[in-house]
Image (spheres, rainbow, N blue to C red):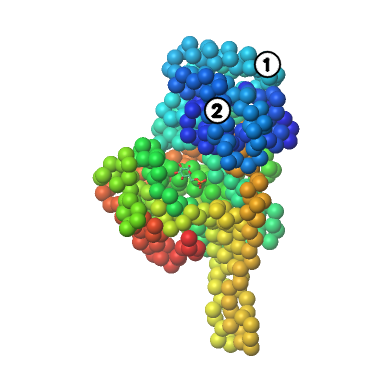
């Protein structure tokens, strides 16, 4: 690994995300030599902490992480500095600027600055405008901004947020996180699509009947009701993760594997997301909310949830791209909390055989071929083919060709946040989202949101079951069914 020099400022350094994801990710980058002696981290948050106290927090966040030993953890944590910070106080930014300059000199960080917004999104705009007005940007190295989700709550607020960060950073300095783009099998999907001449010619409406994307979670809302009540599954999972997966499944092959070419391909695909009418939104999108089971609380009984909450914890939808490659092919998507299991997967269902010659001998049980990419927890893919059963007849059966990554190898591979922070340090924007993508996806989502906000129809499903019947009816109505269980 090529060592990267940088002063990394984390706004929200005391927060849950920093502790659960960012410090472990930075540590693994350090362990792999991607970070070495030429980096320092400034953590900021409101509370008054000392560097020592902060370093303790950082060390604690690494407990149980792979590749740790006391000595390396200590060396790593010694690169961390804490600055208590009120995001609205201009003076505090001046202090931050001085600290960054000092650390830059001490660590020979080549004038590079990486800013990470990992706190409540309502502060993102204020921070960005102060970064600019108090001139925290470096003139000798790079300036980059990593910004966490949610990127707005509708088109209007996303645009406002984008305008405010754009006042300080140009598009090619902005790294909008969608952690699904850091997942091994999501990146693997591109390799699968674009390196197999077996698949390339059939990846279109002539051979594919429908695509299904499932992002199922077993957990409920956990301790995040404060956020989730204002979001719901449509904003939380569909606008970002599901849309990004659709782009990777459906986009044309980029001319080269460069950020610009990949984003151009994605952007072009998103221009084929139709603008829904309210009638289409009503017909093609369903929501649901989990109710209590004998062993689990219903959503409305969870801590900090309104007892009459209309927030959806489940969404299923049908998307039809108005793109020549995909015209008429439904993309069925679903996501939800308190479903039977954690399961993230994409199924590509191929069209049925036009004519089965074995019909003549009474063996007409050929099924459609299916390619399923398992993203998590299992990582791999399965291709189902028809074969002949053993014996004298031509009775057919489904045979699955499967590849599964070995669990030890998965554990040793970088986690999504590690990859993405590593990419940002290396200046690679490929697996981040651009503003144009946000614009198209929010415009699509807003129509559905509006319809739901003006409706009292909210199907319930029992916690631990596969979601409301409406989610199945969406497919059966067109003669389809969810291909994989979870
Ligand atoms: C986050 C959502 O973006 O993704 C959470 O805010 C969700 O609600 C999480 O639980 C799922 O991510 P993963 O990586 O566990 O599939």
| Residue 336 visible (yes or no) | no
Task: Residue 89: name its quadrant.
Answer: top left
Q: Of helix, strand and loop, which one carries label 1?
A: helix
The residue drawn where x is 70% and y is 28% is 36
Residue in front for this viewpoint, 421 or 413 = 413
Judged from this view, the residue extending furthest toward the front is 70
Residue located at (52% from left, 32% from top): 18
Left or right position of 40 against 479: right
Disc number lying in front (1 or 2): 2
Tell me which numbered mark, 1 or 2, is placed earlier along the sequence.
2
Residue 291 in the image, given as x and y percentages of width and height: 31, 53
Q: Which of 25 and 66 is in front in this view?
A: 66
Residue 413, placed above or below residue 126 = below
* Crowding near the residue tagged with mark 2, few <14, some 14–19, many ≥20 C-alpha atoms within 10 Å: some
State the image coordinates of residue 38 (x, y, percent, origin top left).
69, 24
Identify the residue position indicated by label 2 in the image: 56
Q: Nearer the viewer, residue 208 or 323?
A: 208
Q: Give the side of residue 461 with respect to residue 17, left or right.
A: left
Task: Judge from the rendering whether residue 281 lies leftward or rightward of residue 146; answer left or right.
Answer: left
Which secondary structure lies at badge 2?
Answer: helix
Give the CA distance from mark 1 to mark 2.
22 Å
Query: In this picture, is 435 found above or below 280?
Result: above
Q: Residue at x 31, y 54 (%)?
A: 292
Q: Residue 475, how many percent across, how many down?
A: 42, 62
Q: Find out if the beta carbon at label 2 lies less than 8 Å from the nearest ligand 1 atom.
A: no
Instruction: Tell me where residue 236 appears, x and y as whole percent.
Output: 43, 43
Residue ID at (64%, 37%):
68
Q: Name the residue under label 1.
A: 106
């Amino acid at each position: 690994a090529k060592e990267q020099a940088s002063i990394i400022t984390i706004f929200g350094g005391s927060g849950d995300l920093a502790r659960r994801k960012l410090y472990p990710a930075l540590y693994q980058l350090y362990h792999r030599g991607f970070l070495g002696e030429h980096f320092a981290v400034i953590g900021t948050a409101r509370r008054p902490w000392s560097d020592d106290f902060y370093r303790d927090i950082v060390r604690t966040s690494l407990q149980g992480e792979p590749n740790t030993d006391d000595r390396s953890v200590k060396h790593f944590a010694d690169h961390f500095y804490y600055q208590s910070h009120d995001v609205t106080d201009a003076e505090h930014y001046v202090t931050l600027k001085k600290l960054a300059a000092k650390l830059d000199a001490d660590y020979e960080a080549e004038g590079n600055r990486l800013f990470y917004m990992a706190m409540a999104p309502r502060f993102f705009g204020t921070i960005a405008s102060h970064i600019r007005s108090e001139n925290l940007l470096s003139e000798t190295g790079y300036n980059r901004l990593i910004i966490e989700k949610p990127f707005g709550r509708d088109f209007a607020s996303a645009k406002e947020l984008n305008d405010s960060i754009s006042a300080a950073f140009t598009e090619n300095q902005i790294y909008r996180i969608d952690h699904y783009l850091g997942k091994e099998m999501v990146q693997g999907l591109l390799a699968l699509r674009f390196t197999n001449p077996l698949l390339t010619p059939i990846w279109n409406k002539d051979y594919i009947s429908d695509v299904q994307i499932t992002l199922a979670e077993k957990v409920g809302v956990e301790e995040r009701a404060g956020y989730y009540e204002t979001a719901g599954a449509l904003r939380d999972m569909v606008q970002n993760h599901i849309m990004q997966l659709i782009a990777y499944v459906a986009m044309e092959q980029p001319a080269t594997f460069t950020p610009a070419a990949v984003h151009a391909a994605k952007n072009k695909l998103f221009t084929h997301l139709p603008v829904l009418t309210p009638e289409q939104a009503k017909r093609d999108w369903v929501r649901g909310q989990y109710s209590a089971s004998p062993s689990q609380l219903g959503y409305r009984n969870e801590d900090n949830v309104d007892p009459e909450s209309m927030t959806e914890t489940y969404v299923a939808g049908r998307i039809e791209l108005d793109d020549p490659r995909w015209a008429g092919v439904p993309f069925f998507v679903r996501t939800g909390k308190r479903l039977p299991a954690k399961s993230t997967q994409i199924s590509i269902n191929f069209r049925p055989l036009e004519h089965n010659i074995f019909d003549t001998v009474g063996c007409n049980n050929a099924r459609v071929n299916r390619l399923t990419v398992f993203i998590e927890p299992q990582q791999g893919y399965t291709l189902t083919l028809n074969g002949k059963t053993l014996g004298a007849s031509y009775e057919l059966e489904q045979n699955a060709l499967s590849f599964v990554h070995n669990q030890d190898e998965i554990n040793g591979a970088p986690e999504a946040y590690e990859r993405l922070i590593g990419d940002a340090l290396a200046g690679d924007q490929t697996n981040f989202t651009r503003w144009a993508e946000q614009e198209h996806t929010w415009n699509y989502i807003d129509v559905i949101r509006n319809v739901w906000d003006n409706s009292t129809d909210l199907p319930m499903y029992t916690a631990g079951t596969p979601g409301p019947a409406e989610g199945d009816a969406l497919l059966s109505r067109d003669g389809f069914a969810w291909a994989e269980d979870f």
